[in-house]
Amino acid sequence: MQHGAPATTKLMVIYEENTDASSIYGSSSATNINKYATDCGSAQNYQALTHPSLPNYMASTSGLSYASDPWTGDCDPGGTCLTGNNNIFHQVGASGWKAYAESMSSNCSNSGDAYASKHNPAEYYTDVSAQCATNDVPMGGTTSGALHNDVVKSTLPTFSTVTPNLNNDMHDGSIQQADSWLGGWIPQITAGPDYQAGHLTIIIVWDEGSGDGNVPSTVAMIAMSPFIVPGTKSSTYFTHSSFLKAAEDVARVPELAGAASANSLRTTFGF
């Protein structure tokens, strides 16, 4: 653990899928995830406020509710399934964000084996559409590719999203499979210069838990930073707007919509 004033200047979110917190915390299928919670911190009262996936991803990057058509249909980006609403990608500017998507076929694509655009929110915002072809990239693997290179070269942007494919995010694959996938990536990211210097905070969060409709579900959220007191466990009420608030505060940009009144992850976890 590092001491002194936090030096956080970058935040990375790794999105996981469709699993209640009760199926993660303490689970023998999630040994890596629970180790990260013990090594750093976890939220016990983090609420995803709606279903299905896409409205949650949009809320986490805009602070607005997308719990209405066409978003509740998990539509692919295009036509009426695009928005001009402000968002953190636009706030940080073209050089300030990157989206790493596993198994996406090419930059800013809607296709790829086991890839789903509905888990990659940057593609839905028209004010960053010109940046999408450069900043929304296939992830690559742990030995080569976009994410590996940016981690080892300390070229991660201010804000980044990491979207595992459907087999590795608990959507189609098992908890254990996603846990193993994280076990391959997290040690590499935390060994990288950004994390080691205390500049990078990693948030692992689930889009939603069980249920359907506009009904909350309690999901796991793991916060990782060298500045977090190991084993920090919070019962504070958090939502995806709380995550956005943290990302915006790290980026030093205004808090959008629901983020302005959300409880602060940074205050609670100390990054």
Image (tube, rainbow, N blue to C red):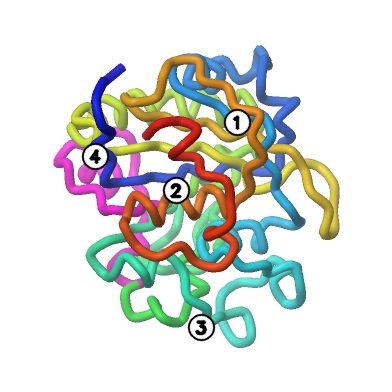
- Residue 60: percent from the left, percent from the top? 56, 57
Q: Residue at x 74, y 42 (%)?
A: 209
- Residue 163: percent from the left, percent from the top? 48, 49
Tell me the amino acid under the disc marked 1.
Answer: Ala
> CA separation, marks 4 and 2?
21 Å
> CA separation, marks 1 and 2?
14 Å
- Residue 59: percent from the left, percent from the top? 60, 61
Quarter of the rendering containing residue 99: bottom left
Q: Say which residue label 1 marks.
A: 43
Tell me the amino acid under the disc marked 4.
Answer: Val
Q: Is residue 213 visible?
A: yes
* Helix, strand or loop for disc 1: strand
The front one of 201 and 33 is 201
Q: Say which residue label 3 marks.
A: 84
> CA separation, marks 2 and 3?
22 Å
> CA separation, marks 4 and 3?
31 Å
Q: Tell me the tag on residue 113.
A: none
Q: Is residue 153 above or below residue 117?
A: above
Question: Is label 4 in contact with label 1 (beta carbons under 8 Å)?
Answer: no
Q: Is residue 248 left or right of residue 114?
A: left
The boundaries of the magenta stretch are 132-160
Near mark 1 (Cα within 10 A), the count class, few <14, some 14-19 or many ≥20, is many
Q: Say which residue label 2 marks.
A: 246
Question: Is label 2 in contact with label 3 (beta carbons under 8 Å)?
Answer: no
Q: Is residue 226 above or below residue 200?
A: above
Whether residue 195 is in magenta: the answer is no
Q: Is residue 211 above or below residue 168?
A: below
Q: Say which residue label 4 marks.
A: 151
